[in-house]
Image: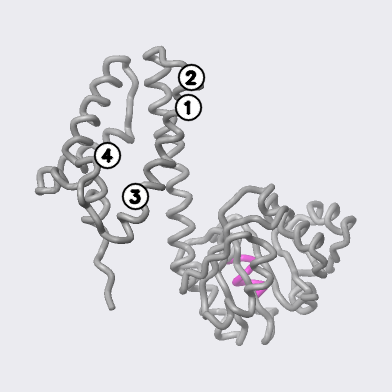
Amino acid sequence: MMHVGVVGLGKMGSAIARNLLARGYQVSVWNRSPQPADALVAAGAMRHSSLKELVEAVDTVIVMLWGDDAAREVTLGQVIPAARAPELVIEMSTLSPAMYETLEAAATRQGVEFLAAPVLGSVPLAQQGSLTVLPGGREATFERARPLLESLGSTVTYTGSVSASAYLKLANNTVIGVVAETLAELLEVCDRAGVDRPTAVKSISGAFGRVANSKTQQLLDRDSDPRFSLNALLKDLQLAREAAQAVRVPTPILECVLPEVQRAAASGLGDRDYIALALQRIAMPTD
């Protein structure tokens, strides 16, 4: 069984290490502060006297850190310089596209294989091995890492490049932020208007799922035949703004969206399906 080093033992890194131990992997662990390793060592992981020693001992290093600064210090400054072919470094931290590219270039100079593999999911999913993993890098490197990645995630989607992995992860988390703020706005409006809270939560939450499920194929097919027109959406958004103003609730997300819908309708898309708002900004695929 592969010997895996897990570097960075925050909540996600520790959960990944526990999952790998449960699946029979030989696991070594390292953290900048040593205390988080104690429970994992008690569960069967190995501790090393230094990060360099860990990197030299394992077949594959999984790195799960906070962000670019930590990756620059740990992955770029310590892990990659200590690695030797045919070792594999899998960077699972959420980083900028530029940082992933910097790490890949450094690994290539070192003769070490590298994957960016940010994940989607929570700590419980990490411990169960049910994350969504977005690996990017050389396809041969991905195929080599696939069995390990499939131990970590129930969905493993190869993105192609390390930067593609970064953009996809950041796009997914942007959705989370936009949804959270939109929920906050709309639930406050409904609260002020006296709408039953459980009813509002279920109805508004369900709307996100309905949009995602109903529009996926239209986006893929670039199909803007009208189901619900942009003009109709514009009319309803204007009514929504008036309703929010009537109960004195600020709606910054709505105020950002409404001008974009107005511009799209004025450009001649008003009679098309509202998904034309997205399609007009998506480049046509090239052969």
Where disc 4 sits, the SS reads helix
Gap in Å between the C-alphas at discs 4 and 2?
25 Å
Which residues fall within the magenta stretch? 72-79
Q: Which label's residue is closer to the chain start, 1 or 3?
A: 1
| Residue position marked by numbered label 1 in the rendering | 201
Name the residue located 71 percent from the left edge and 58 percent from the top edge.
16
Look at discs 1 and 3 and give the one toward the viewer.
Answer: 3
Q: In the rendered view, tell whether residue 52 sits above or below residue 173.
A: below
| Residue position marked by numbered label 4 in the rendering | 257
Principal secondary structure, stretch drawn in magenta: helix
Frontmost residue, 158 versus 98: 158
| Residue position marked by numbered label 2 in the rendering | 197
| Residue position marked by numbered label 3 in the rendering | 215
Where disc 3 sits, the SS reads helix
Q: Quadrant of residue 211?
A: top left
Q: Residues within 10 Å of mark 2 (few under 14, many from 20)?
A: few
Asked if disc 4 and disc 3 are in contact, CB closer than 8 Å, the reply is no
Q: Residues within 10 Å of mark 1 (few under 14, many from 20)?
A: some
Q: Is residue 215 left or right of residue 87?
A: left
